[in-house]
Image: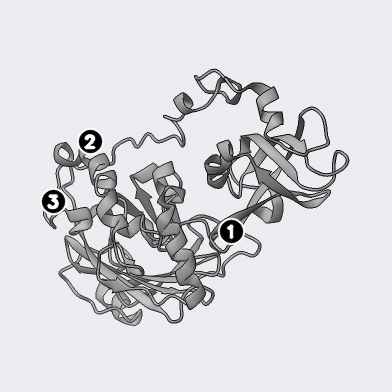
């Protein structure tokens, strides 16, 4: 009966791979990418890759990754077909690698969660859903297997995944990205127009092949693909706690009035003096969504407010690098108006504080 069911569904009927009662390939278990981050394809026991071993694999090779060629995908020899304007964006990100969200505990995204972090993942499956639990930041992906439609007006770090079976291969269609993830630590990137088609195929009981085909008409000149094998881990293997909090070691760098440990030696008077010709006296506070636009290598900032639109910002040099990291977040900015009266012209920002991760506008 199982064989008949498999043949009716167009499956190969191979007997060398595990299957669920409904005849579908069974991917359940704990898995680890073969050859990832310089590791061999051998099974890596917990004691060999736990704690410092995992962290060292993720961060110790930053210099080598940063030296990768302009459009090579993480030293895999895969050349990314960027559009001319996208190459400029990639070069800027390569020079500002600290903007990458993954080292700051954000979700890795698709296909990076499968390709990049040197951590295992577990798969749980039944006839209706396949769920991937990535150890990195405890990221879950719940994939319906009914080939249903993607939702409207929804954007996410991982996008939206919808699965279907093509014989013994699970095909996952992924869209609805928020455009904030990177492909790797060298500045390779996508935007919200990314479309990924993943293919999961069991080669044997202990190995599956992962393929991802990427299309992004505003970043890439043509479709391109990555492909590698993933190895099953022993039954005793388990996912470990991944404790990560963005900015958890940053307090020592900030002044006390910004929630840090250092006294503010400059003080409000010095900050106002740096505002130059501002005719407004005193300090003002405005809140909104921080936006940034790249202009010939420089970043033009604006604070988006639902009631007023975009307010141009001029950051004090002392907070320039911090402001760069807070783009697309809800923030509160202190400073002075540079116009003739309060509320007009550009706003000279002397300090900034995060109010929320992400912005509430446009559903993102």
Marks 1, 2: nearer the viewer: 2
Residue 259 is situated, as x and y percent measured from the top left of the image, at 56, 23
What SS does tag 1 mark? loop
**Dot 3: within a 10 Å radius of its alpha carbon, few (fewer than 14), some, or many (20 or more) residues?**
some
Marks 3, 2: nearer the viewer: 2
Quick check: marks 1 and 2 in contact, CB under 8 Å?
Answer: no
Residue 328 is situated, as x and y percent measured from the top left of the image, at 61, 50
Residue 304 is situated, as x and y percent measured from the top left of the image, at 73, 50
Q: Mark 3 highlights which residue?
A: 43
Q: CA distance from mark 3 to mark 2?
A: 18 Å
What SS does tag 2 mark? helix
Q: Mark 1 highlights which residue?
A: 155
Q: Residue at x 15, y 36 (%)?
A: 47
> First in sequence: mark 3 or mark 2?
3
Query: Horizontally, is 193 left or right of 119 in the view?
Result: right
Q: Residue at x 87, y 42 (%)?
A: 340
Q: Mark 2 highlights which residue?
A: 52
> First in sequence: mark 1 or mark 2?
2
Query: Horizontally, is 216 left or right of 314 in the view?
Result: left
Q: Residue at x 45, y 58 (%)?
A: 93
The image shows residue 227, relative to residue 46, as above or below, that is: below
> First in sequence: mark 3 or mark 1?
3
Q: CA distance from mark 1 to mark 2?
A: 34 Å
Residue 320, quarter of the rendered image = top right
Nearest the eye: 88 or 241: 88
Quick check: marks 3 and 2 in contact, CB under 8 Å?
Answer: no
Q: Residue at x 41, y 79 (%)?
A: 223
What SS does tag 3 mark? loop
Nearest the eye: 154 or 251: 251
Residue 117 is situated, as x and y percent measured from the top left of the image, at 31, 51
**Dot 2: within a 10 Å radius of its alpha carbon, few (fewer than 14), some, or many (20 or more) residues?**
few
The image shows residue 152, relative to residue 8, as above or below, that is: above
């Amino acid at each position: 009966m199982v064989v008949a069911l498999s043949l009716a569904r167009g499956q190969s009927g191979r007997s060398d791979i595990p299957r669920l009662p409904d005849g579908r390939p069974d991917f359940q278990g704990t898995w680890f990418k073969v050859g990832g981050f310089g590791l061999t394809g051998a099974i890596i026991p917990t004691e060999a890759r736990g704690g410092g071993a995992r962290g060292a694999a993720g961060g110790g090779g930053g210099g080598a990754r940063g030296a990768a060629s302009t459009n090579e995908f993480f030293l895999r020899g895969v050349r990314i077909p960027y559009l001319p304007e996208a190459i400029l964006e990639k070069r800027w990100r390569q020079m500002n690698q600290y903007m990458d969200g993954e080292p700051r505990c954000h979700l890795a995204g698709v296909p990076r969660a499968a390709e990049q972090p040197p951590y295992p993942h577990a798969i749980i499956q039944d006839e209706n859903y396949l769920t991937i639990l990535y150890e990195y930041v405890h990221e879950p992906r719940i994939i319906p297997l009914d080939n249903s439609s993607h939702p409207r007006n929804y954007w996410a770090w991982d996008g939206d995944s919808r699965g279907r079976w093509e014989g013994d291969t699970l095909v996952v269609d992924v869209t609805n990205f928020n455009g904030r993830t990177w492909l790797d630590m060298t500045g390779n990137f996508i935007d919200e127009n990314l479309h990924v088609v993943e293919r999961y195929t069991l080669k044997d009981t202990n190995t599956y092949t992962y393929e991802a085909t990427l299309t992004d008409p505003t970043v890439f000149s043509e479709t391109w693909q990555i492909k590698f094998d993933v190895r099953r881990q022993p039954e005793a293997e388990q996912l470990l706690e991944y404790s990560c909090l963005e900015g958890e070691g940053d307090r020592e760098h900030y002044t006390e009035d910004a929630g840090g440990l250092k006294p503010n030696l400059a003080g409000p008077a010095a900050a106002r003096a740096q505002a130059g010709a501002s005719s407004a006296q005193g300090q003002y506070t405005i809140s909104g969504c921080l936006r940034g636009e790249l202009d010939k290598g420089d970043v033009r900032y604006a604070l988006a407010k639902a009631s007023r639109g975009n307010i141009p910002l001029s950051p004090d040099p002392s907070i320039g690098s911090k402001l760069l990291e807070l783009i697309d977040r809800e923030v509160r900015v202190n400073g002075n108006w540079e116009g003739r009266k309060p509320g007009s012209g550009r706003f000279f920002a002397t300090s900034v504080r995060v109010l929320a991760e992400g912005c509430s506008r446009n559903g993102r």
